[in-house]
Image (cartoon, helix red, strand yellow):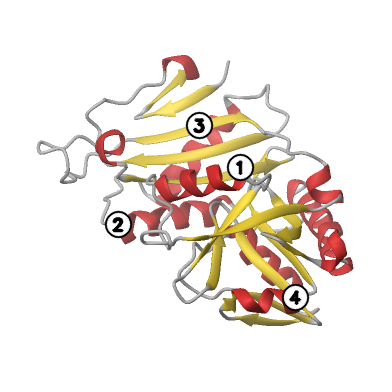
Amino acid sequence: MDTYYIDGEFVEDGHAMIPAKDITVLRGYGVFDFLITYNKRPFHLDAHVARLENSAREIGLTLNHSNKEISDIVLETLERNPHHTESNVRIVYTGGISPDGVTPQGNGILMVMATPKYELPDWWYTDGAKIITVDMERFIPTSKSTNYLSAVFAQQKAHGQDAIEAVYKTKDNHLLEGTTTNLFCFKGETLITPPDNILPGITRGVVLDLLKDRYDIQLRHIPEQELHEMDEVFITASNKEIVPVVRIDDLVINGGSPGEKTKDLLETWAGYTRAYGLGEAG
């Protein structure tokens, strides 16, 4: 049985409840963030909590907890789940109860849920995966809000095409980000990733820092038609980490195999996260 933090109390997961009239339930108005642990150490917790705060600011949601209070609650929640080898951590701040069912009143609920880390298929990393593109953009993309209708719709479309992710595409056919991932492309010795209108991924930021001295990094828009010129493609996310992409819609990337630069990054990432879990990397 897992233990969650809900509105000032630690409860068993089966007893975790929020009011049915909360506008997160009624309107999808709320924010969340997600991270995993390495050696039971939450990965860049401060950055995730800061992003939660920014997400709330972007949609006008008042948080009644400081960043430190939220971080401390996350750490205590993890301590109350010692049976986890590693954990997934979801931090949620709801919109609260509103008299008219739509206007926030600054009475949102903080929830922290720790569950055992879900292991993804090994073949994603050894063989590479397929993703698709969708003609769709997220509302307020810089906020990680609980309104995930576009993501659910896009993921259903992806799964229907045997893909693991869907990447949003603008009306000008510029690629943005996946439903839960950030997008990267190698073109020669240049690493390219979209600059804006995306959620600033924590894993994305670490990857950029790890590779800043190895490659020319370009933060710029990626036209869909330029994908034919890309040598390697990969996606990043807190739960997925680094996933090589070998097919985008009907386009085969790098002959259908993960590229050498991406495989080298996977090794670099594994070393970094091992060190992070030991407190030797920040």
Q: How would you rate the neighbour count of disc 4 (Cα within 10 Å): few for under 14, some for 14-19, many for 20 or more? A: some
Disc 2 from disc 4: Cα separation = 35 Å
Measured as percent of width and height from the top left, residue 217 is found at: 69, 81
Residue 201 appears in which quarter of the rendering?
bottom right
- The answer to whether marks 1 and 3 mark residues whose Cβ atoms lie closer than 8 Å is no
Residue that appears at 10% across and 39% down: 100
Give the labeled residue for mark 1: 160
Q: Tell me if label 1 and label 4 are in contact, CB under 8 Å.
A: no
In depth, the one of 148 and 96 nearer the eye is 148
| Nearest-to-viewer mark from 3 and 4 | 4
Point out residue 34 in the picture as x, y percentages from the top left corner.
54, 45
Mark closer to the chain start, 2 or 4: 2
Is residue 258 in view? no
Considering only order in the chain, which callout, 4 or 3, is on the residue closer to the N terminus? 3
Name which of mark 1 and mark 4 comes first in the sequence: 1
- Which quarter of the rendered picture does the N terminus lie within? top right
- For discs 1 and 3, the disc positioned in front in the rendered view: 1
Q: x%, y% of residue 128? A: 80, 53
Observer-side mark, 1 or 2, equals 1
**Residue 64 visible at all:** yes
What numbered label is drawn on residue 230?
4
Circle 2 — which element?
Answer: helix
Mark 3 packing: few (<14 Cα in 10 Å), some, or many (20+)?
A: many
Q: For the residue marked with disc 3, what is the amino acid?
A: Met
| Quarter of the view holding residue 102 | top left
Residue 113 image label: 3
Q: Is residue 117 above or below residue 58?
A: above
Q: Which mark is residue 59?
A: 2
Check disc 1: other Cα within 10 Å, few if <14, some if 14-19, many if 20+: few
Determine which of the numbered discs, if any, sits on residue 189 in the image.
none
Which secondary structure, mark 3? Answer: strand
